[in-house]
Amino acid sequence: MLEIKFVRQNLSEVRSALAKRGAEKTLDSFTHTEEERRSILGKLEALRHERNSVSEEIARLKKNGEDGQDKILSMRETSATIKELEKDLTLCEENLHNILMAIPNLPHPSVPEGKDENDNLLVKTHGTPFSFPFLPKAHWDIGEQLGILDFERAARITGSRFALYLGAGSRMERALINFMLDTHTEKHGYTEIIPPLLVNRQSMTGTGQLPKFEEDLFHLDGADYFLIPTAEVPVTNIHRDEILSEEDLPLYYTAYTPCFRSEAGSYGKDTRGLIRLHQFNKVELVKFCLPEHSWNELETLLEQAETILKRLELPYRVVTLCTGDLGFSSAKTYDIEVWMPGQNAYREISSCSNFEDFQSRRARIRFKRKGKKGTELVHTLNGSGLAVGRTFAAILENYQEADGSVRIPEVLQPYMGGMQKIETT
């Protein structure tokens, strides 16, 4: 969330920044409630001043042996009014806090302006899309023909937008998870975490999923727990309500988890295959760092996520999300999009974001500099390193052969017992 003092002192600038992401109306209720707060505060200050002056007058009358009963009765009424106004002020400040929780982060000046994904800025491309002497198939057809994916039985077990992996498909999904974790821990210096898959309301609020996006989450009836939409939530909340030391930073964590999303409002979009499921696997990267280092850390985070695709030899491109496509908590986001020949399109496979102090203010994650008084908010970043199911899908489409088999990327073969190809049995 934004700092309330900053918003109060920079209303025009904040409104202008929010307008770039089409969210300026989220500030309307803040300004209305802030005016109400100032009005109450003005009345309170006047009444408190009056009470102090009359109290001094009453003391003077008593000292001189004069009757001050009328003033005493008047002050009782004033004190009662003050108490009511103090209650109104507390309620008003609570409303301001709740309003702030629904206002998105301000985009960094380097974020391109735009309305939607069509205005995202291409940063670079890597690799040349494979050339096929045949018409490439989509991964859902390849997987079902090889007997390693079954969407019909998954729908029977649970419902639509679930996947059932079988045999070599299950093994390759597991191989990808281990490959990604090994790369990030051994080559990039991340500490591996196995977090809870259920989190409480405070954790969801800390990373920005609540209160705004509750309909996108799976909530457990009878307990105020949520299934995680991403490992970003439990991993970021590891340090909620903590004060770290400057020497502790930066902290790098990686975690593999299943992720659960209701995908409310996305019906009819990417409904086939592994692209948009209610349950999917992902390896997440989370960073905590000093404020002055977070923008360099974002560039490094992007490079670390790219490493997975480079080692798998999958063509991809990187785009900077425009202001209108930016996530709620993010100040800037890079999307990595992998080439999917079976769909003749690039598909998002990772988002790498800098939240600056937006999440840490909500989650109260602070640090103390050596030799300085007080505390500061850390900066948090996160990225997919990568979405496992989408990586699986990209391998099927990019490494497919004319006979229906799929070659296994060389770097992944040791994780699959030396297997070089998945073929129809």
Image (cartoon, helix red, strand yellow):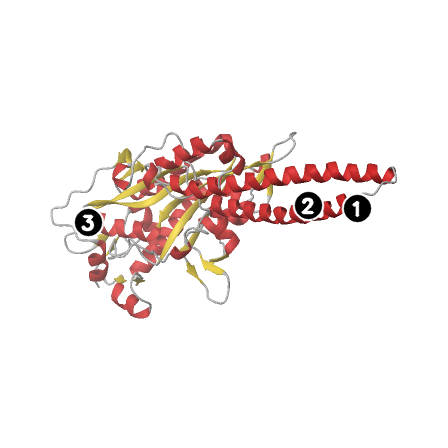
Pointer 1: residues within 10 angstroms few (<14), some, or many (20+)? few
Residue wearing tag 3: 343
Which callout, 3 or 1, points at the residue further toward the start of the chain?
A: 1
Q: Nearer the viewer, mark 2 or mark 3?
A: 2
Camera-side residue of 351 and 192: 351
How much space separates mark 3 and mark 1, taking CA atoms?
87 Å
**Observer able to see residue 189:** no
Amino acid on which the number 2 mark rests in the picture = Thr
Question: Residue 377 location, x and y as percent?
Answer: 55, 37
Residue at (54, 49) in percent of width and height: 238
Q: Is residue 408 left or right of residue 18?
A: left
Mark 1 residue element: helix
Q: Compared to 251, does 422 lie above or below? A: below
Q: Earlier in the sequence, mark 2 or mark 3?
A: 2
Task: Look at label 1 and name its amino acid.
Answer: Gln
Q: Report which residue position mark 1 lands on.
A: 69
Q: Nearer the viewer, residue 171 or 282?
A: 282
Q: Residues within 10 Å of mark 3 (few under 14, many from 20)?
A: few
- Residue 18 in view: yes
Distance in Å between CA atoms under marks 1 and 2:
14 Å
Determine whether the residue tagged by mark 3 lies in a helix, strand or loop: loop
The disc at residue 267 is none
The residue that disc 2 covers is 78
The image shows residue 68 at horizontal and vertical percentages of: 80, 43
- Relative horizontal placement of residue 52, taking residue 39 as reference (left or right): right
